[in-house]
Image (cartoon, helix red, strand yellow):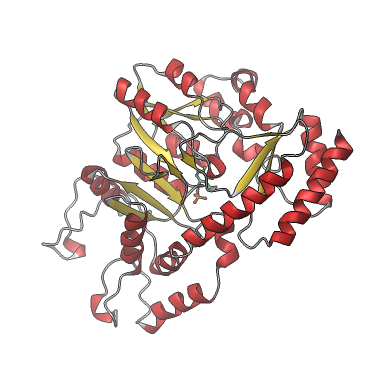
Amino acid sequence: MPGFELVGEEERAAVNEVFDEGGILFRHGFDAMRKKGRFRVIEFEKAFARHMEVDYALAVSSGTAALKVGLMAMGIKPGDEVITQAFTFVATVEAILDVGAVPVMVNVDDTLNMDTEEVKRRITPRTRAILPVHMLGVSPEMDEIMAIARTHGLLVLEDNCESPGATYGGRPLGTLGDVGAFSFDFGKMLTTGEGGMVVTNNPEYYNLAREYHDHGHESNPKFPRGRDTHRIPGFNYRMGELQGAIGVVQLQKLEYIVGQNRQHYARLQEGLQQIEGLRFRRVPDKCGSLCDALIFQVPSKEVADQFAERMAAAKIGTKNLPDAMEWHFAGYWDHIFTRFGMTKETLWESLLPTYERLSRSIALPVMVKYTPERVGQIVEEIVRIAGELS
Ligand SMILES: Cc1ncc(COP(=O)(O)O)c(C=O)c1O
């Protein structure tokens, strides 16, 4: 995930400007001390909303915060069930827990995202929302998820922490559901060090999100901040001005990042197609993938482990699969699911189909700064390793 690859002079200049213009690091107020009257977090929000073709964007302190603020804004309450997928980062489930809701995990299909048939089977009278996760650049079948949600009167929160710039049916991922959540942590496609964004077209969700992330402040224009009005209790998930300044600059690089990713990915895939028995993750027809990782599957977990070991020896990394499975597969999270009446064994059993897919998968990272020569070397090495292991 290459936002950090491109952190450089532009980001440094943007941060310096904040200091040159008075050094105001807080998103609100201090108007008289802002030499040019600029508010970086607000600039970032406006630019992000424009880029994602959405009415509202709210910057927050992390992707995890974006998920939690999104759930609160949608009115998810203690005891509500939220259906999400077994292949995700643990933060998705933590956000559901933090609003007191119950995470219901479904397996993934060959897109390595939410299996829509299983979603239908897991709906109960307590289900309030579906939370699909666009893992490693690719969406699930979003048309099906939206249709299920509308049929059953459920809300949809998209966890798009990993895939800003990817699309479905030509629309930016993260903007198809009721609310979308993005992350700008240091491993993500766009980075502000830590940070996140909540997006929506619903003014009430936006207002609730804005208030909740800022101690309940309504930012009522009739009152100074110290006398502001409130209607809900909140918390502090605000983004600061330095992150906002960096975010504005990083966002300007997104199109370039996606373009580079797609070129490298196409070359890698073309080169690896010659390997017999290698299967690629399915990308839904309507999905414009971010192409930040090329996931291929080998016949067994044993082969996958040996493959990854030989890739590491050849100085080719992997991206979460298989190196960080423990944090990306819910079968390992008995510290969470034993609270909901499951045992280690029943949890693992229920998610076995996901384990079988993930444990045979290798995610090859696609870096923005790859050269055609480097891509050629990677293909050569992987073809060699596949030959050795066949
Ligand atoms: C799918 C997914 N959701 C949520 C998050 C949480 O984002 P953050 O690290 O900004 O809190 C991540 C980050 O790794 C993620 O990959």
Left or right: residue 107 versus residue 296 is: left
Image quarter of the C terminus: top right
Pick the front one: 186 or 22: 186
Q: Residue 129 location in percent, x, y? A: 36, 29
The single residue placed furthest to the right in the displayed view is 388
The single residue placed furthest to the left in the displayed view is 222
> Eyeballing the image, is 197 above or below 148?
below
At horizontal 57% and vertical 48% (from top left) the residue drawn is 291
Quadrant of residue 120 within the rendered picture: top left
Q: Residue 287 location in percent, x, y? A: 48, 39
At horizontal 55% and vertical 68% (from top left) the residue drawn is 7
Q: Residue 363 location in percent, x, y? A: 67, 42
Left or right: residue 204 versus residue 97 is: left
Give the mark count: 0
Image quarter of the N terminus: bottom right
Q: Residue 103 location in percent, x, y? A: 46, 28
Pick the front one: 153 or 307: 307
> Eyeballing the image, is 345 above or below 240?
above
Pick the front one: 91 or 273: 273
Pick the front one: 75 or 88: 88
Quadrant of residue 187 within the rendered picture: bottom right
Left or right: residue 274 versus residue 103 is: right
